[in-house]
Image: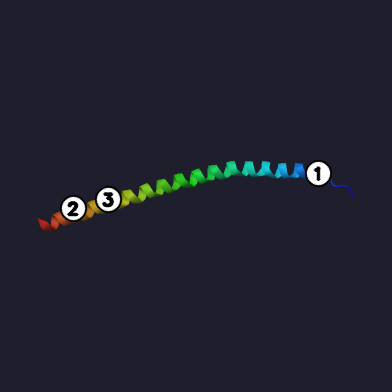
Amino acid sequence: MTYNYRKTEMVEQASRRGAVDLSVIMMILAFAVGGFFMYWLNGQAALELAEREVVEEVDEMEEA
């Protein structure tokens, strides 16, 4: 029985090529998830700021 080293080598190279293709997709996905998180975080900050303004207005009305 003979061992074909080249055939094994090609399989490993093909596997690496698939991993490279997948890594590009994963980088794009990570960028999209990060962007969505920043968008969501900005919305939460805007809600918090609006909530504080309402509380400050109510406090001013109670003092008057």
Residue 7, image x, y percentages: 80, 43
SS at circle 2: helix
Q: Residue at x 19, y 53 (%)?
A: 56
Image coordinates of residue 1 in percent, x first then y, are 90, 50
The amino acid at mark 3 is Ala
Q: Taking 63 as reference, is 52 left or right? A: right
User: In 3D space, how far apart are the residues under numbered discs 3 and 1 (Cα atoms)?
Assistant: 67 Å
Q: What is the quadrant of residue 27 in the picture?
A: top right
Q: Which mark is residue 50?
A: 3
Tell me the quarter of the image containing the C terminus: bottom left
Q: Which mark is residue 57?
A: 2
Disc 2 to disc 1, how far (Cα)?
78 Å
What residue does disc 1 label? Answer: 5
**Sequence-wise, which precedes: disc 2 or disc 3?**
3
- At which x and y percent is residue 5? 81, 44
Q: Position of residue 10 (x, y in %)?
A: 76, 41
